[in-house]
Image (tube, grey):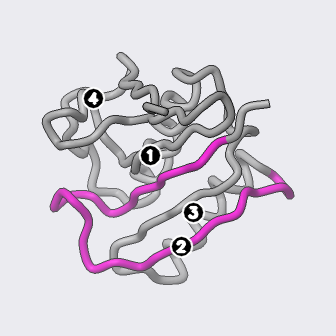
Amino acid sequence: MTPTLINPAGLHDPVGYGYSHLAAAGKDLVFVAGQYASGPDGTVPTPDFTEQVELAFRNLGTALAAAGLGYEHVARLGTYIVDHDEAKLGALLGVIRRIWGERPPAQTLIGVARLALPDMLFEVDAVAVRG
């Protein structure tokens, strides 16, 4: 089976970076590529970590909506933090709690030295389930 690839108009065009925003596999699974604090042109509009987390999750919501899904459909998150520390964890947890409350999805947090673009401080990918 060939996955359906989706690149929503509300997000930057990722093809030049070598990926698509979503891949729907069959009727049940949707894989969302790493979302970061990207503006319409793919650049990072702010150096502030907390603002980057907020915008990355907003972009995740836009990606999910393009597949007819919402945050409630997310089964797993992968989060990546440059130079991870307790303060950054707190900023991430604030967003997770606001979106999912006491029922957050499974999550793996990985501290990294660097991400794809020099200004990126945070990235989140997801697996969502329809139905």
| Residue bearing mark 2 | 109
CA gap, disc 2 and disc 3: 10 Å
| Crowding at mark 2 (Cα within 10 Å: few <14, some 14-19, many 20+) | some
Mark 3 residue element:
helix
CA gap, disc 1 and disc 4: 12 Å
How far across and how far down the image is residue 98, in percent?
Answer: 72, 48
Above-or-below relation of 65 to 42: above
Callout 4, which amino acid?
His
Disc on the earlier residue, 2 or 4: 4
How far across and how far down the image is residue 91, in percent?
Answer: 56, 64
- Mark 1 vs mark 2: give the one in front: 2
Q: Residue at x 19, y 30 (%)?
A: 41
Disc on the earlier residue, 3 or 4: 4
| Residue bearing mark 3 | 92
Quadrant hosting residue 10: top left
Mark 2 residue element:
strand
Q: Residue at x 70, y 40 (%)?
A: 129
Quadrant hosting residue 94: bottom right
| Residue bearing mark 1 | 56
**Which region is colored magenta?**
101-128
Q: Is residue 102 magenta?
A: yes
Disc on the earlier residue, 1 or 3: 1
Q: Residue at x 70, y 63 (%)?
A: 106
| Residue bearing mark 4 | 12
| Crowding at mark 4 (Cα within 10 Å: few <14, some 14-19, many 20+) | some
- Mark 3 vs mark 4: give the one in front: 4
